[in-house]
Image: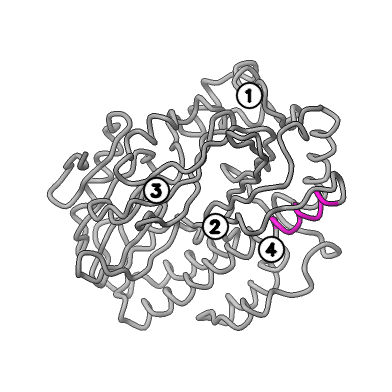
Amino acid sequence: MSGIMLFDNALAWLAEPLPSDVRQSLSRLALAEDVRRIAVMPDVHLSDDVCVGVALATTGTIYPAAIGSDIGCGMLAIGLDADAELLGSEQNAAQLLEDLYRTIPSLKHRQATAPPALSESLRDLPLSDGKLEKLANRDGRLQMGTLGRGNHFLEFQADQQNRMWLMLHSGSRGMGQAITAHHLRKANAPKSHGRLLSFEADSRLGRDYLIDVAWGVRYAEENRLAMLNAVADVVRSRFVVEVLRETLIDANHNHVRQEVQGGETFWIHRKGALPAALEEKGVIPGSMGACSFHVSGRGSAEALWSSSHGAGRRLSRTEAAARISTRQFERELQGVWYDYRLAARLRDEAPSAYKDIRAVMKAQRQLTRIDRELRPLLSYKGT
């Protein structure tokens, strides 16, 4: 089925009615200059300036708020040569969590465990400003291979054949935030439209921003791969298990890039929207206690070759922490290993704080095809 028309230039694929504040935010976005088309995903939810779960097309204007500050944030999935029984015991789960705490910090590495330098590919990729270069070689180095907090996570899962998989969600860490803040301080020079600051893609400021976005996307990819390599070392030494590199899926959902769609060239902005060109592989997670999916895009032009990037929040973090008790959180996570000591601090990540992932997937059947369904076994989150 086609999307629901919200405005003249906006189509939506919805799993539930839009809250009024989300509709108002989308209405403002639809009126912004040079916004030719908007595709609203079923995981859409309110965020600063531009909602998460949105793809939009412009011809020459770049809106940083339509990308977000976690540039390149995305999902990685990879199979393991083990089955779910490996995590059938509390002892194995506890040992694995202990190893993850030791090797994958949520914030930053200590000097002793940090990489001695950023990779050659990152060093060769330019940044637009010396201050950002200095930050990359300092903070960026210490944060390489770290998870982050909030909704970032690392999860061991089992597919329908009981094979184990790793899935992780992380992005460009402090570097994406620094890049965004650096450029927004300059965004008064070009025109701004309502609350949304912008650059023209062919201006010097626009070109500098796009250079740094490309760097942030690469950094986020390498960050996920660094964590994958750490996990590979852990499961090899702890359980004599190997990761299956040929099964790797990695896709980011926060970016801007030029794409030719329907014979027209657009700047496609995605903020919490998974690229879903025809047969493009991706990962769509549920919540900590829900199933997740490996998918292939259907190449829907109406949806700007995009789909949801997850289930999407039903409750803000503040609302979830106020409404969901620790006991309720523990009930919702029955059957999934996690650090039980953190239950009270993880309430805003409870499954009931998120939309029903099955309803989300049903709403976007036109956009993406399910290749594999997975259930959670063990979840590791930073707080």
Residue type at tag 2: Asp
| Prevailing SS of the magenta stretch | helix
Q: Check the image and report above or below for 213 versus 151.
A: below
Q: Position of residue 104 (x, y in %)?
A: 75, 52
| Callout 1 secondary element | loop
- How far apart marks 2 and 4 lie (CA) works out to 17 Å
- How far apart marks 4 and 1 lie (CA) works out to 30 Å
**Which mark is first along the chain, 1 or 2?**
2
State the residue at coordinates (20%, 63%). Answer: 33
Residue type at tag 1: Leu
- How far apart marks 2 and 1 lie (CA) works out to 26 Å
The quadrant where residue 133 appears = bottom right
Asked if the stretch drawn in magenta spans residue 121, the answer is no
Q: Position of residue 152 (x, y in %)?
A: 59, 46
- How far apart marks 1 and 3 lie (CA) works out to 30 Å
- How far apart marks 2 and 3 lie (CA) works out to 26 Å
Mark nearest the camera among 2 and 1 is 2
Q: Position of residue 186 (x, y in %)?
A: 40, 73
Residue contact between numbered discs 2 and 3, judged by CB atoms under 8 Å? no
State the residue at coordinates (65%, 61%). Answer: 225
Please state the extent of the stretch shown in magenta in the rendering: 227-236
Which residue is the extreme one toward the left? 8
Q: Which residue is mark 2?
A: 250
| Callout 3 secondary element | loop
Q: Which residue is mark 4?
A: 144
**Which mark is first along the chain, 1 or 4?**
4
Mark nearest the camera among 1 and 3 is 1
On-image quarter of the N terminus: top left
Classed neighbour count for the residue bearing mark 1: other residues with Cα under 10 Å, few (<14), some (14–19), many (≥20): many
Residue 333 marker: 1
